[in-house]
Amino acid sequence: MAKKLIDLSQFNKVKDWPKVKEAVDAVILRLGYRGAHTGTITYDPKYQEYVSACQKLGIPKMIYFFPCSISTAEAEAEANFIISAAKKTDLCGAIWLDSEVVYRDKSGRSDNLSKASRTKYLNVILRKLHAAGYECGVYASASWFAGNLNDSELEPYCLRWVAQWADRCTYTSHSIDMWQYTNTGAIPGIDGRVDISKCYINIGAGSETKATRKGVTRQDIVDQICSWEGWSESNGKFKRIIDIYNYYLSTAVKTGTLNYPVKYTDEWCATAASAAYIQAGAPELFPIECGCPRTIELAKNMGIWKEADNYVPSPADAVLYDWQDSGSGDNKGIPDHIGIVIAVNKPAGNIYVMEGNKEEKVARRILKVNSRYIRGFVTPKFLEEEPTKAVVPEAKKKADVANSTFEPTKSDTDLAVEVWYGTHGSGDKRRSALGSRYDQVQNSVEEIGQSVSTFVSASKAYMRKHGCEKLI
């Protein structure tokens, strides 16, 4: 379902932020602009006030910037300004570049740029934002995309926020990520007209992003790697994963990591595993490296390498493979591939893994515990480790497990989630525990196991409903 977003700048008058929070799913704040005549980069006069209000109330937010660069150096300066500001707050989604004419008489410094030049400078900014780990895109009217930009030459990861104030959006050159459908909307708590958009892409929780958490959790890593599922060499999105890794390599202090910028033509499975930890904000927990053999070497130095094919991992652990494994004895060969564990079904002995560069895309694999080709595991140590069997709070666990009963108010999907995590055992034990609902629950078990997104969604819904922070 599309989400309702509004964009705000100095030209809007917000009187009641709590009412605004109830009326929208997120806001997009104007960070600033480059002066159309002076060429000076300036914050929007209301930006800090609006950011503080959103932070205080937990309103999810994105930001946008109005660039007027007329050279590569100016575009780079704009990008640096945006990145510096973005690092100081938590964002729920993309950073947007507002591309449009400044003055109708075209007297603005960038109003007369050619399509090629305007596109070139936008791409300079997009590349720097992308390399810094931010989703990014361009805002423009449908006619501006067609007449004033070389739309097809924008970076492959560039999102589109299309303005067309009509009953429907006729833009067809690219997928539409957001549609601003009116500039005369009314929102409780705001005086005057408001721009309103429909958002078709996922947005985060804003105040609950990694910037304000006590510590990164295993689920954060799982969510990060799963958010890249389907990114591939064919659609070009895999480049962002490599950019995240290379940007970190160029700016952070590493321990043991080879100073090798990964090329788009290189294999990128280990790069993807490292990038997931980088992007989630926990690179110190993982051996950041672009090659599988050195990943093991660094993990050993960190004391987080598990040399055991039969080890039962936890989500956010990494599994390494050796495709030359004979299947006899402990595999100690040279590793060829790596993926991040996203779930484990202990009763069934299944390990669910999300892997970068699996057939040239981010995709999942299901393997058995102690199966052939497993080389070993990287087992990061998180700050707040939860017990591996803490499926439900203690009071519920006594009723659900020790007494082999369950709350009759739980849905079939709730019980199926518990089955996946081993609460009700297997075979006759499970049949006895579930009683007359056994068949319905088993059907739900199969349904939520059909895709990673369904599995993760059901698990998160269970945690919210029953007050659990973690299932495994």
Image: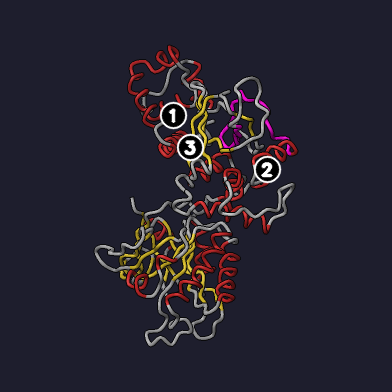
Please report contact status of discs 3 and 1: CB closer than 8 Å, yes or no. no
Q: CA distance from mark 2 to mark 1?
A: 32 Å
Crowd band around label 3 with a 10 angstrom C-alpha radius: few (<14), some (14–19), many (20+): many
Q: Is residue 300 left or right of residue 398?
A: right
Q: Earlier in the sequence, mark 3 or mark 2?
A: 2
The secondary structure type at the circle numbered 3 is: strand
Q: Is residue 125 above or below residue 469?
A: below
Q: Pointer 2: what residue?
A: 287
Q: Which of the 4 image quadrants contains residue 456?
A: top left
Nearest to the observer: residue 232 or residue 132: 232
10 Å crowding of disc 2: few (<14), some (14-19), many (20+): many
Any mark on residue 131, and which?
A: none
| Residue placed under numbered mark 3 in the picture | 364
Coordinates of residue 285 in the picture (x, y in percent): 66, 42
Q: Which residues are magenta?
A: 302-322
Dot 1: element:
helix
Q: Name which residue lies at 37% across and 84% down.
A: 104
Left/right of residue 191 with respect to residue 303 in the rendered view: left
* Amino acid at the residue labelled 2: Pro
In the depicted view, which residue is nearer to us: 377 or 37?
377
Mark 3: amino acid? Arg
Question: How many labels sit on residues?
Answer: 3
